[in-house]
Image (spheres, grey):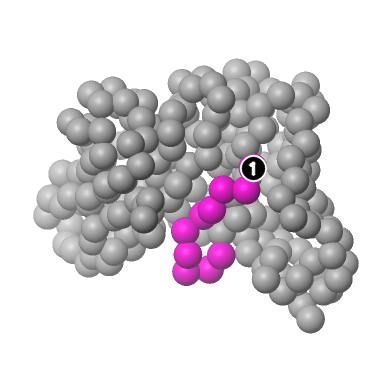
Amino acid sequence: ILNVEQSPQSLHVQEGDSTNFTCSFPSSNFYALHWYRWETAKSPEALFVMTLNGDEKKKGRISATLNTKEGYSYLYIKGSQPEDSATYLCASTDSWGKFQFGAGTQVVVTP
Amino acid sequence: EAQVTQNPRYLITVTGKKLTVTCSQNMNHEYMSWYRQDPGLGLRQIYYSMNVEVTDKGDVPEGYKVSRKEKRNFPLILESPSPNQTSLYFCASSQTAGLPSYEQYFGPGTRLTVT
């Protein structure tokens, strides 16, 4: 049973369109929320780490927000490009170093 | 080059034959962790280590052992592998696990098949 849930499981986006998807996590014992990008045949790579309610982080066309009170985070991709195609993983961690990952949202950007 | 290395990258073995997957990082990171990835289940944490000689169980520790005798190394030991341990394994490290929370760096993965 995954306590961290991501939705949707997959989505198809036209090149140039913007999209967003959700990560929900238990707000009890919350410490930090991580986002990773995972391309096929590669290893996950860190995008963002957020800890405070209301945190917003941005890297290029990708941004993320965090709501610790209600237990969710959004990841946004603006003007999707084919190179954005990947699985996006979120993970919640407690103060003891224990991580729980969601199953991921697979994004396919078509030209 | 800063990296996390894992060996072997691919392994096919038989039930019951003890094996070790090595993990090493050259970034002087305090925190290291092992995950397994199975279709539809995401990454599940097996064991993690906050520092040398400090290890703790993740969500799926059964059938695995770890040790952290040196800061850079965190081997994963399967004493008696079974077919349900067939999976893709990732080792990861980060600067610390405490505040602030740092991103993890992942190794290249080890694909293990137990027949």
> Where, by quadrant of the figure, is residue A94 drawn?
top right
In reply to whether residue A45 is colored magenta, the answer given is yes
Q: Vertical placement of A37 versus A83: above or below?
A: above
Residue B45 placement, left or right of A27: left
Callout 1 environment at 10 Å: few (<14), some (14 to 19), or many (20+)? Answer: many
**Residue at (79% x, 66% y) in the render:** A80
Q: Main secondary structure of the magenta part?
A: loop
Q: What is the three-letter code of the residue carrying label 1? A: Phe
Q: Residue at x 40, y 40 (%)?
A: B93
Q: Position of residue A26 (x, y in %)?
A: 66, 27
User: Which residue carries the number 1 mark?
Assistant: A48
Q: In front: B112, or A20?
A: A20
Q: Name the one closer to the observer, A100 or B79.
A: A100
Viewer-side residue, B72 vs B62 = B72
Which segment did they paint magenta?
A39-48
Is residue B105 toward the left or the right of residue B52 in the image?
right
Say which residue appears at 28% left-offset and 23% top-offset. Answer: B54
Can you give x and y, in whole percent of width and height, for residue A59 in the image? 71, 50
* Quadrant that contains the C terminus of chain B: bottom left
